[in-house]
Image (cartoon, rainbow, N blue to C red):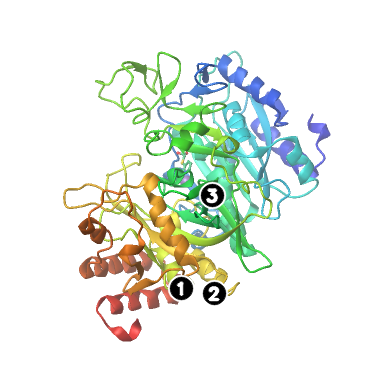
Amino acid sequence: MVEQLQNLRLKSWLAEIADLCKPEKIYICDGSDREYDELCALLEASKTFIPLNQEKRPHSFLARSDARDVARVEERTFICSPTEKEAGPTNNWRDPIEMRAELLQLFDGCMKGRTLYVIPFSMGPLGSELAEIGIELTDSAYVAVNMRIMTRMGAAVLEQLGDGDFVKCLHSVGVPLEEGASDVAWPCNPEKTVIAHYPQHSSVWSYGSGYGGNALLGKKCFALRIASTMAQKNHWLAEHMLIVGVTNPEGEKKYFVAAFPSACGKTNMAMLEASLPGWKVECVGDDIAWMKFGDDGRLYAINPEAGFFGVAPGTSMKSNPNALRTCASNSIFTNVALTPEQDVWWEKLTPEPPATATDWLGNPWTPESARAAAHPNSRFTTPLEQCPVLDPAWNDPAGVPISGIIFGGRRSHTIPLVYQSFNWQHGVFLGASVSSETTAAMKGVVGKLRHDPFAMLPFCGYNMGDYFSHWLEMGTRSTAAKLPKIFAVNWFKKDAEGRFIWPGFGENIRVLKWIFERVDEDIEAQKSPIGYLPNLEDIDCTGLQLSKQALGDLFAIEQSDWLQEAEGMQDYLSQFGEQPPDSFHEELAQLRARLKGEESSL
Ligand code: O2Y
Ligand code: MN
């Protein structure tokens, strides 16, 4: 099989890795249905997969991870650029040579007794000018089947690759199987987990974890950390953004991208079921956007992924009916609960919990149990093509033209429901200012404000200060009229009683409608110290139980809160030394002046 490989770079890299990791077998994935079924059968035999009820959830499986391997591990994720400055203050940096020495020790013999799967994958439509190819070498069949859903994977990718270059992604669960030793359902090595990125070599080495972003290396490691460095060099953008097409009742369509920190409902917005008659939202992607200017001066986006790796708890017919329709079959569920009917369940899936279930740890569970049935970071892996509101252009190699960029976070106070930046430079400043309150799904204290510029804090593969400059520079590559307009939203503002003021979910179309109409300035807006705010009558509240007072509260701008916001941003930026662009200091000074009513700077 290996002899058949045409790409000499791949052949020699595979030989080098096989020599190091010493797998028992090497298998090159062809991406076929037959292969997927065989790997699933293998995972069933090794007890990694529990088949679900064929009638209720056809062709689907449940996996339970090791309880110590349940999420991305930011503290064990490293950028190994030549200097610490290139990684910047927001990344964990390790000297590349020192790290390589450690990795060579860790990976030495790590695949003994296991199969090394060679996974050729394309991030983006095969052959698209915006797509990139990667090869993941892994000793996990669970990773192989998940990659089959999450990417375009298999023989066609090798063909497309020809003798070209690719991103090298090496992964091991870090548990060699000595002769005669029996395996566990979820092998992993949490004490030694390390996820190392080499942006200068376009390679990733991941050891010890079999879960999500740590192991499915096409996603956060390649499509964001490595791709962001490629994008900086080659004048494009690799962003933590959903992509949607919005159509108004007149049939006019515009595409938008939106960046929200993890756990802010990106997947819900990507598949939004519009509550306003005649409005339609269609999904291109829910997590990552790669964008490049076209010859016509417009910014075009592709979704590099082919599947959803969505968080299960909280996903319901109210929050995201289309996600539930998408994962109705051909899906892999990880760390959710199992019902007596052999179907899956998680918190809020149904108004009433099942009377009994088996929790994500495999223990008996009832609604009286003190612990949640599903892990807060439990996931469904499901094909994009099954999404009932999939955009017809989702697989267009040219991408979709972007009219607006939306930034958001989870903020109980201060930030209004929606506003628009004055221009590109101000919009980039808004992107850099994104911050969000932590939730129970995250490690650490709940409700703590965390700055998360462009929602890229855990995902930018180089110095965040240089990333800000890259965004500003991108704005000089087209004319103001053709650049997407930039907006900020906040679905999460609370009233004095601590209740959400805005209903969210499908009602967010009312905000998208305002954004849609502002793109071509079909409606006017008010200039305020923080940006353009809606005239309240332009937020369509037809049929909504929202008082005039509540609507006003959603847009109230408190001078003292905003001066504090500016202070917080200045403090945050100070960590970048001379790195943040001068224009950010101008933006801060102008924001303060406008808040204080110093009209000349308006
Ligand atoms: O915990 C993980 O490995 C998954 S994290 C994730 C998965 C899908 C989409 N986004 C995220 C994220 O953390 O932003
Ligand atoms: Mn994400």
- Measure the alpha-carbon separation of dots 1 and 2: 8 Å
* Three-letter amino acid code of the residue under disc 1: Asn
Q: Secondary structure at mark 3?
A: loop
Q: Residue at x 45, y 45 (%)?
A: 272
Residue closer to the observer: 474 or 46:
474
Residue 229, label in figure: none
Between 352 and 448, the one nearer to me in the picture: 352
First in residue order: circle 3 vs circle 1: 3
From mark 3 to mark 1, how far is it between C-alphas? Answer: 24 Å
Residue at mark 3:
288
What is the quadrant of the C terminus in the image? Answer: bottom left
How dense is the environment of label 2, judged by Cα within 10 Å: few (below 14), some, or many (20 and up)? few
Residue 513, above or below 151: below
Residue 156, position as x, y percentages in the image: 75, 38
Q: Considering only order in the chain, which callout, 2 or 3, is on the residue closer to the N terminus?
A: 3
Write down the residue under mark 2: 480
Label 1: few (<14), some or many (≥20) within 10 Å?
some
Give amino acid for label 2: Ala
Disc 3 CB within 8 Å of nearest ligand 2 atom: yes
Q: Position of residue 460 (x, y in %)?
A: 50, 55
Q: Which residue is mark 1?
A: 423
